[in-house]
Amino acid sequence: MRPDTTGSQPPGFRFIQRLVLKAAKTYYRAELSGFENIPPGPALLVGNHNAIAVVSPEIWLFGSRYFEEYDKLKVLGHDLVLRAPGAARFARSYLKYIPNSHASALRALAEGSHVLVYPGGAWESCRPSRERGRIDFAGRTGFVRLAREAGVPIVPVVATGAHDGVYVWRRGTRLARALGLKRWFRIDAFPVGLSFPLLFLIGPLFPFVPLPRKVILKVLPPVTLTHADAAGDARAAAAIVAAMQQVMNESAARRAPGS
């Protein structure tokens, strides 16, 4: 039974949540499952990016379904969003963004929150379309260290399908460095491709409307780290990514024509 949280949410929060959930069931024909796997206590929710920048349906779809049952979510948000006038307030109030730092996440977990992180960041979000079926955290293992230090389980969240709504030709890592995005904003990609309705896609913040594609989002059972993981964060991270990749492969097969 979902707790009464109307007093703790900003005005219009539930309306936005219901609106997004309705869009999930129509525009994206979304299948959202496994939310019973989220433990009542603090946990680190680890997701894979499945679209670009703010046009990332996996975040909106997860949040809209999550708040039907829980009210403890914090999302590690990008610095650029949290510094933008207007957008920052919306991100903090409605998307539950907090600064994307190890210390910030530890505080939220110590307070009993469910903390959602996307380790792949812009690297994964802006990956070329030919790699859309691959979960790619760029070898990052900080999420394992964070969960181990906080003493909380890791709950993988796997999204499949939204990346089909835009075509990315190149990730643009060299261009991102040349423009100073990596140095000043911690953005390591400047994607170039095609999108609707302006035809082109130029940069991580380029406005576009994602084409309607079936999205499957599944929350996996919690992974409890052992003391042995302290000396092998990379192995633990690789095992979690492998489990997520298997689920993505299965979901992609279900989305295939004729399946």
Image (cartoon, grey):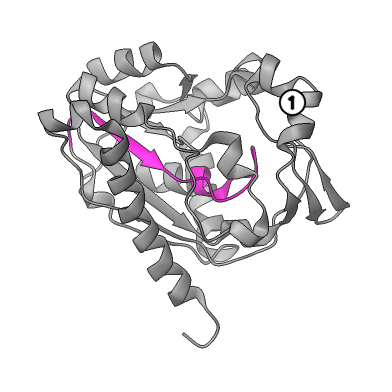
| Residue on which the image places disc 1 | 177
Image location of residue 99, percent across then percent down = 49, 16
Residue 244 x, y percent position in the rendering: 35, 54
Looking at the rendering, in which quadrant would you find the N terminus? top left
Tell me the residue at 39%/48% (across/down).
65
Q: Is residue 142 above or below residue 102?
A: below
Rendered image quadrant of residue 185? top right
Q: Quadrant of residue 71?
A: top left
Q: Is residue 152 left or right of residue 35?
A: left
The amino acid pointed to by label 1 is Arg
Q: Could you tell me if residue 67 is visible in this image?
A: no
Q: Residue at x 54, y 35 (%)?
A: 121
Q: Is residue 162 above or below residue 93?
A: below
Instruction: Give me the residue at 23% from left, 15% from top.
Output: 110
Q: How many marks?
A: 1
Given residues 54 and 48, the one toward you in this image is: 48
Query: In the rendered structure, which segment of residues is drawn in magenta?
Result: 40-60
Percent from the top left, x then y, of residue 169?
76, 54
What residue is rendered at 79% in x and 39% in y? 206
- Relative placement, left or right, of 178 versus 26 is right
Magenta span includes 47: yes
